[in-house]
Image (cartoon, helix red, strand yellow):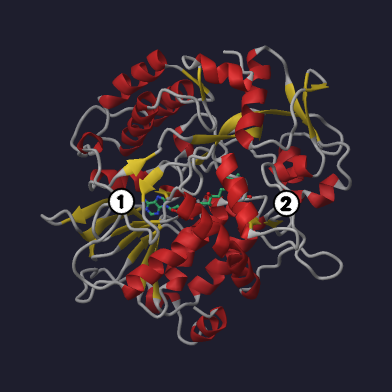
Amino acid sequence: MNPHEVLRSQAPSDTSRERRSLSAATRVAHPRPVIVGSGLAGLTAAWSLDPRNCILVTPDRLTVGAASLWAQGGIAAALADDDSPTLHAQDTLRAGAFAGDRDTVDRITAAAPDVVQLLDQLGVPFDRTADGHLDLALEGGHSRRRVAHAGDHSGATITTALAHVVSHAPHIELLEGHTATRLVTDQSGAVRGIIVQDASGTRREIDTDAVILATGGMGGLFAHTTNPTTALGQGVALAARAGARTDDLHLVQFHPTALDVGRDPMPLLTEALRGAGAVLLADDARFVDELQPRDVVAAAVWEQLTDGRRVRLDARAVLDVRTRFPSVSALAEESGLDIAHDLLPVRPAVHYSMGGVTTDARGRTSVPGLWAIGEVSRTGLHGANRLASNSLLEAVVTGQAAAQDISTRATGRWDTSVPSADPETVAPATTGASLPLERARELLDTACGVLRDGPTLQSAVDQLSAHTAGDGAYVAWLIARSALAHPHSIGGHRRTDDPGALALHGVSA
Ligand SMILES: Cc1cc2nc3c(=O)[nH]c(=O)nc-3n(C[C@H](O)[C@H](O)[C@H](O)COP(=O)(O)OP(=O)(O)OC[C@H]3O[C@@H](n4cnc5c(N)ncnc54)[C@H](O)[C@@H]3O)c2cc1C
């Protein structure tokens, strides 16, 4: 799709919100695809469906609550003269402990340069060098300077640019202030509709045979997280209850440098700070190569904390640090810290979910009529550990792929390479004792942190299994259950009952 043609077709001629807001009568004769979530993935899918009419459901105003707005570092693409998609793919596979899907990794890294070009043409003001080239940043795990960025507020800049286009697109009907609560399936198991609920609790059903889940991650289910506290894995609950397969839910990425000042969610000190020269100190001594992949740095930080040392990030030697990292500087200031002068206390926090609703290359899930894109999906790009700045990229590529699939889809058999779900994971939302969210967060934090062991995981699974009628506890149960079923150390976590791996990584329990 030519972005210029699309932009021309979206000229804001007759686009009043009143005209486009969904009327009370939501049962329509010709069902439109429904996109759930207005982060970068959902916005991309909605925009890319042009000229196909669609409905975009989002709990608040457009983009509010999306982790996409919070991305600091940027978006990875092999754009430098000394770089190539092959090198980007190799770095992605290496960071992911070679557990990624080769085809997915090759496809998404190959698409990356075009994605950045598209965003550039959309008007995203990426930082540039004095000679006009994109100013590409170096981040942990990347062998080349590869991250296109807009200051240290890249996610907000990119997402807002796309939201502007979406809010003026006549083919998109915005349903703001609504949360998707259930998928409706027919007797064959195919999607036939979706239930949405507004802030007053009023529910309505939208008929559709195509739902794209773009609901983001699950970090809010953990007590220590950098994610919005609204990132509660709702998309996983919607999909899994409808019978969709999920995979790799136990593969959680811990960001090594969340600012540890008692805030929830924890402010993030971007990896780019370390790329620019900030160092990690444990009781004032360096202990790790700060540019190693996140899992290595997070495990090293965890080890120091477990041994009772104070771990702090020292960005004092980074040239012009306050002007180069204004968002980080502001976040630190809110806690009375000056990044140019103070040592910044840090600890690992849940940052990203590699697992999710399993999809094929077109975003199709195992349930006919259901697509998943962005962080809620498990595409196989990240393997056991996401390479920094690959997720905004994945959000755009998967959003485009799902939109293209829906636009060109022939009715009939749902063909996908995604296997069926394990029936034991499909829990109904029947009534049962509810579990306070804070309790689920504590349980997951304790059982599914950087260091894990079988008995603690079993206890969490047992406690959560009685509460799967609630979506938060259901997803927490799925995560803990997946962790229990995978007894080896890989990616972001280390099993303390997998001693070989502990020795390999030099982590003491
Ligand atoms: C602090 C931070 C920094 C990051 N930095 C980077 C970075 O530099 N580079 C990078 O590539 N990645 C980064 N990431 C990760 C990246 O931001 C996310 O993976 C990505 O933005 C996910 O996009 P998404 O569209 O899938 O989900 P989101 O942007 O989270 O959007 C999800 C949307 O779904 C909505 N939603 C959820 N449930 C429902 C429901 N039931 N009904 C209706 N709507 C619903 C939400 O309100 C939201 O609008 C960072 C993440 C964080 C938290």
User: In this figure, which residue is indicated by the disc labeled 2?
Assistant: 144
Image-quadrant location for residue 288 = top right
Callout 1: helix, strand or loop? loop
Q: Residue at x 66, y 12 (%)?
A: 307
Which amino acid, mark 1?
Val
Mark 2 lies within 8 Å of ligand 1 (Cβ measured): no
On the rendered structure, is 209 left or right of 449?
left
- Mark 2: give few (<14), some (14-19) or many (20+) Cα within 10 Å: many
Q: Residue at x 56, y 18 (%)?
A: 502
Q: Where 15 falls versus 185 (above or below)?
A: below
User: In this figure, which residue is indicated by the disc labeled 1?
Assistant: 418
Q: Position of residue 116 (x, y in %)?
A: 63, 66
Pick the front one: 80 or 168: 80
Q: Position of residue 124 (x, y in %)?
A: 66, 68
> In this view of the protein, can residue 453 be seen by the observer?
yes
- Mark 1: give few (<14), some (14-19) or many (20+) Cα within 10 Å: some
